[in-house]
């Protein structure tokens, strides 16, 4: 018998809904961190999606269960980063150092100024510019210095992936997390690669993910490749995010996270644009399920309005926090 929709179903799981929080936010990087207060929380580090001139700071959001999100306000302001452009604050990435437990925040300073690194004792900031100069500014192998992503491998080695203008590079970081250890190497995984690299390790395989198309319209999408090494080469795996004409367009620039305490359950955090909306900056942050098939390939993501069900943030067996 169909249930009465006016009666709340106490047994129905609480859902995140999509978007997971209000406002125009893009390029979301999702993590699980246990901050200095010892409480594990999910964190999302997005770009504030507005015209470039007004993008001069970064915010972050946190949640204890993926469904209720709290805005922590500005965590890094370009007025405190003198070498930055003071506009086009894009695509941040956050990682916890396995060496000093501090949190390192990598960010793009618009067209030309480069990629910076900031540091904090807390995943919710505030972050301060760590080195006073860009970590990367020049082009290597044609890669524009935007869209940084820091990946920390199980052995404690950290890698910086980045690159716009159709080229992707990776550079190992030093133990300080604030310097390039070896010169970047090109790992552009596909002729269609555009930007937004993200790395995750699952069952010993390295999955490099990226975005293709034009970020401001419905050609935007995401794809992935697989390797035995964080340095590639990557075998093309297929598309994971694409338009759904019933739900949303322009889905891309994402991150993924294994749900804590599960054998193999994953979520994908990405931005997408409302159907019929032609303003390229109108991007919202969403979370949906990501499914690895038995053969290790990734199924195309089902974009939803309901999002994902509540899942408590926890660090299992004192084990890993975020590795992506
Ligand atoms: O949000 C600004 C830019 O749009 C990012 O750097 C690109 O990856 C694209 O998402």
Image (spheres, rainbow, N blue to C red):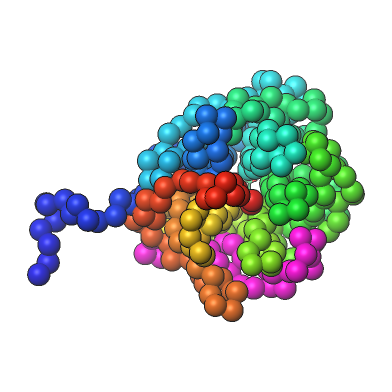
Residue 185 falls left or right of residue 201:
right
Residue 33 falls left or right of residue 109:
left
> Quadrant location of residue 145?
top right
Residue at the spot 44% in from the left edge and 58% down from the top edge: 288
> Quadrant location of residue 4?
bottom left
Residue at the spot 37% in from the left edge and 41% down from the top edge: 68
Relative vertical location of residue 150 with respect to residue 197 in this rendering, above or below: above
Determine the residue located farthest toward the bottom in the rendered image: 295
Determine the residue located farthest toward the front in the rendered image: 317
Is 22 magenta? The answer is no
Residue 40 falls left or right of residue 116:
left
Q: In the picture, which quadrant includes the N terminus?
A: bottom left
Residue 108 falls left or right of residue 241:
right
Q: Nearer the viewer, residue 235 or 324?
A: 324
Residue 177 in the image, given as x and y percentages of width and height: 78, 39
Residue extent of the magenta highlight: 221-247
Is 227 magenta? The answer is yes
Residue at the spot 79% in from the left edge and 53% down from the top edge: 170
Q: Nearer the viewer, residue 80 or 244?
A: 80
Residue 323 in the image, given as x and y percentages of width and height: 64, 51
Relative vertical location of residue 85 with respect to residue 307 in this rendering, above or below: above
Residue 194 in the image, given as x and y percentages of width and height: 69, 58
Residue 72 in the image, given as x and y percentages of width and height: 49, 29
> Quadrant location of residue 238?
bottom right
- What is the count of numbered marks? 0
Residue 36 visible = yes
Residue 29 visible = no
Residue at the spot 55% in from the left edge and 38% down from the top edge: 34
């Amino acid at each position: 018998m169909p249930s009465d929709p006016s009666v709340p179903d106490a047994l129905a799981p609480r859902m995140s809904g999509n978007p997971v929080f209000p406002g125009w936010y893009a390029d979301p990087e999702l993590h699980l961190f246990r901050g200095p207060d010892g409480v594990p929380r999910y964190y999302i580090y997005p770009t504030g999606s507005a015209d470039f001139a007004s993008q001069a700071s970064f915010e972050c959001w946190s949640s204890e269960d993926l469904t209720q999100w709290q805005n922590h306000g500005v965590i890094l302001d370009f007025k405190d980063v003198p070498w930055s452009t003071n506009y086009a604050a894009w695509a941040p990435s956050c990682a916890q150092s396995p060496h000093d437990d501090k949190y390192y925040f990598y960010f793009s300073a618009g067209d030309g100024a480069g990629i910076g690194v900031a540091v904090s004792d807390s995943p919710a900031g505030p972050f301060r510019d760590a080195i006073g100069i860009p970590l990367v500014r020049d082009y290597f192998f044609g890669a524009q210095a935007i869209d940084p992503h820091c990946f920390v491998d199980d052995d404690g080695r950290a890698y910086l992936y980045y690159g716009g203008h159709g080229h992707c590079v990776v550079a190992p970081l030093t133990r300080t997390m604030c310097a390039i250890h070896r010169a970047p190497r090109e790992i552009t995984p596909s002729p269609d690669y555009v930007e937004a690299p993200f790395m995750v390790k699952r069952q010993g395989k390295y999955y490099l993910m990226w975005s293709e198309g034009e970020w401001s319209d419905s050609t935007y999408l995401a794809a992935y490749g697989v390797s035995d090494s964080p340095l590639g080469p990557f075998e093309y795996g297929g598309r994971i995010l694409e338009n759904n004409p019933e739900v949303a367009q322009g889905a891309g620039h994402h991150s993924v996270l294994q749900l804590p305490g599960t054998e193999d359950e994953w979520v994908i955090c990405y931005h997408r644009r409302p159907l019929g909306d032609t303003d390229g900056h109108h991007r919202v942050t969403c979370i949906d399920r990501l499914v690895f098939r038995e053969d290790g390939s990734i199924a195309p993501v089902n974009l939803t309005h309901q999002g994902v069900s509540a899942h408590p943030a926890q660090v299992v067996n004192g084990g890993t926090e975020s590795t992506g």
